[in-house]
Image (cartoon, rainbow, N blue to C red):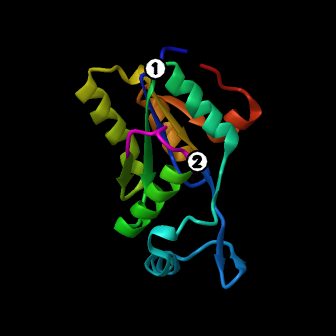
Amino acid sequence: MEIIRLAFFDVDGVLSAPEYRDQGEAVIGFTEEGWQHWCEEEEEAGYRYCKPLPPVRTFAEERKKDGSRLFVLTATAGELETKAKEVFVREHYPALFEAVIPVSHENQKVAVIREMAKENGIPLTQCMLVEDTLATLLKAHDAGICAVHVSNIFAGNVSG
């Protein structure tokens, strides 16, 4: 594997194990309208029940130690969800990521990585995307980006 200079991590299912509670009861899945309502009600605390994933934290820490710049690259439904994700990342992954970069749709992630690589004079082969959405990983792979499915981190199938 080439040296990774820019590494991007998704939030839902990668940095966090999604968990939501309403009046003490677990909530599994949301409609788009329900998610908007949740974000409006919870504001910056929308991810307070979500759990960080220690193997992913260790993997990110190793990338940073190896010299990679780390970013969160995540699809959000708007500013409230972005703020909630920023709070989650700040609380559970302090000082690890340079920024949370929101996109309105998964299919924009590869374009963001291309742009940041270009701005920094870094070849796409030295960029990594850690993700749980297969379609996004396939687009990243086709662009020459090192595409890592989060399950490979848990299985120990990915190294420096």
Q: Position of residue 29 (x, y in %)?
A: 63, 72
| Residue furthest top in the image | 2
Q: Amino acid at mark 1?
A: Gly
Residue at the spot 66% in from the left edge and 25% down from the top edge: 158
User: Which mark is first along the chain, 1 or 2?
Assistant: 2
- Crowding near the residue tagged with mark 1, few <14, some 14–19, many ≥20 C-alpha atoms within 10 Å: few
Along the horizontal axis of the image, is 119 left or right of 155? Answer: left
Give the camera-side residue of 89 and 31. Answer: 89
Residue at the spot 43% in from the left edge and 25% down from the top edge: 144
Q: Give the dominant element type of the magenta stretch: helix, strand or loop.
A: loop
Residue position marked by numbered label 1 in the rendering = 67
Along the horizontal axis of the image, is 144 left or right of 59? Answer: left
Q: Position of residue 111 (x, y in %)?
A: 33, 40
On residue 15, which mark appears? 2
Numbered range of the magenta stretch: 92-99
The image shows residue 79, relative to residue 143, as above or below, that is below
